[in-house]
Image: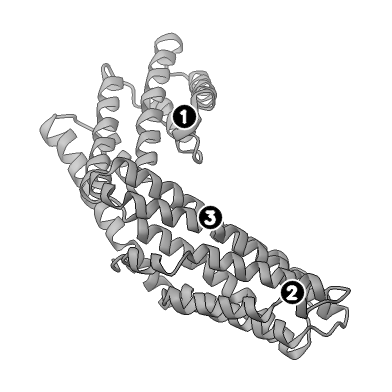
Amino acid sequence: MARAVAGRFRRARWSVLQTAVAVSVSWFVAHDLLGHPQPFFAPIAAAVSLSASDVLRGQRAVQLMSGVALGILLGTAVEAVAGTAAPAFAVAALLAMYAALAFGGGPFGQGLMFVNQTAASAILILALHRPGSGTERLVDALIGGGVVVVIGVLLVPADPHRLLDDAARGVFAAVRDALADLRDEVAEGRRDQDPDRELALGQRIHSRLAALTQARGTARQVVLVAPRRWRSRQSVHRAIARSKYLTLYANAALSLVRVAGAALASGEELPRTLREAVAELADACAVLADGGSAAEARAAAERAVRLLDPAEHPGTGYRGPAVYAARACARDLLAALGPAEDDRRVRPSPAR
């Protein structure tokens, strides 16, 4: 438990530090330089946009600034027509959320940031209304978002290779655990009787794949808008293309677990070479989950492919599908790793 918490702290330390600096700078600009008496929108905008994650920072900043601007406009309009009584709050929330849903899409459509910020801003305009507050709140939000762009996009942009590597390691760790369990089950000729095991396994792997999808989106944004990352654009796009095969790989691994499990449950004897291939694939995932050598993992996957020569494994029942699923798993892993020359072309990201 303590080790897991320490790991989360270590991974998030730079993001948290950047957020703290952005919050302080936003308040200083809005309060000390511009003289706004209560510029809470500025530091809040910075904190929400940066947060403790490098993922989709630029997109969050755009969503927040756009949502706040739309919410302020709607809140000001509702206040002018309906005042600040209780029914006005309902009208403001209704209009804000429907307007956000109507405008949301593209860079605004990721999650509920745009909708939530639009509604919250409209409500705050009514709750804290005073003459001229709408314009002041809008300026504060733009200050906070602008500080985020300067710090999180221009000065200290995320490392796209590190984002992709971290997300890929999460996928490899989930698949490693699944294949290691399967390796033990096949070796012992037994089947785990927990009916919810496969569902939990699928949920874990697909949650890691969702994180990888977000990392790919962030990497694309970073190399598009951050000048400091433009030089790595080609290598990042190659890494993104390879990472897409991880989806096929993870799903092939799930299929392998289910088919091999069905074979064990029905009492079928799986071939020795399948057991050896599953062990090779589990070892390859263990290497990659720990950030080890891609060449070592590639060699293990190639050994698995050779073990699963289709001419050597005819059979009925679940035996044949299990072999085919294992072969697909090995080949998808090789596609995700890419050719050996890519290991030399892309220098690993430094630990942060």
Residue position marked by numbered label 1 in the rendering: 119
Residue type for callout 1? Ala
Q: Is residue 128 above or below residue 206?
A: above
Q: Which residue is mark 2?
A: 310
What residue is at 38 percent from the left and 28 percent from the top?
66
At x 33% / y 49%, what residue is drawn?
Answer: 233
Image coordinates for residue 342, horizontal then vertical, percent: 39, 65
- The residue type indicated by label 2 comes to Pro
What residue is at 42 percent from the left and 25 percent from the top? Answer: 122
Q: In the rendering, at what x and y percent does residue 323 appear?
A: 74, 74
* Quadrant assignment for the C terminus: bottom left
Question: Would you say residue 61 is visible in this rendering?
Answer: yes
* For residue 208, side relative to residue 66 (left or right): right
Crowdedness of circle 3 by 10 Å Cα count: few (<14), some, many (20+)? some
Q: In front of the other: label 1 or label 3? A: 3
Give the Cα separation between the discs numbered 2 and 1.
Answer: 59 Å
Q: Which residue is mark 3?
A: 244
**Position above or below: 221 against 286:** above
Q: Position of residue 328 (x, y in %)?
A: 66, 67
- In the picture, measured across the screen, residue 285 lies left or right of residue 120, that is right
Give coordinates of residue 29: x percent, y percent.
15, 36
Q: How far apart are the two marked residues, 1 and 3, measured between alpha carbons?
A: 36 Å
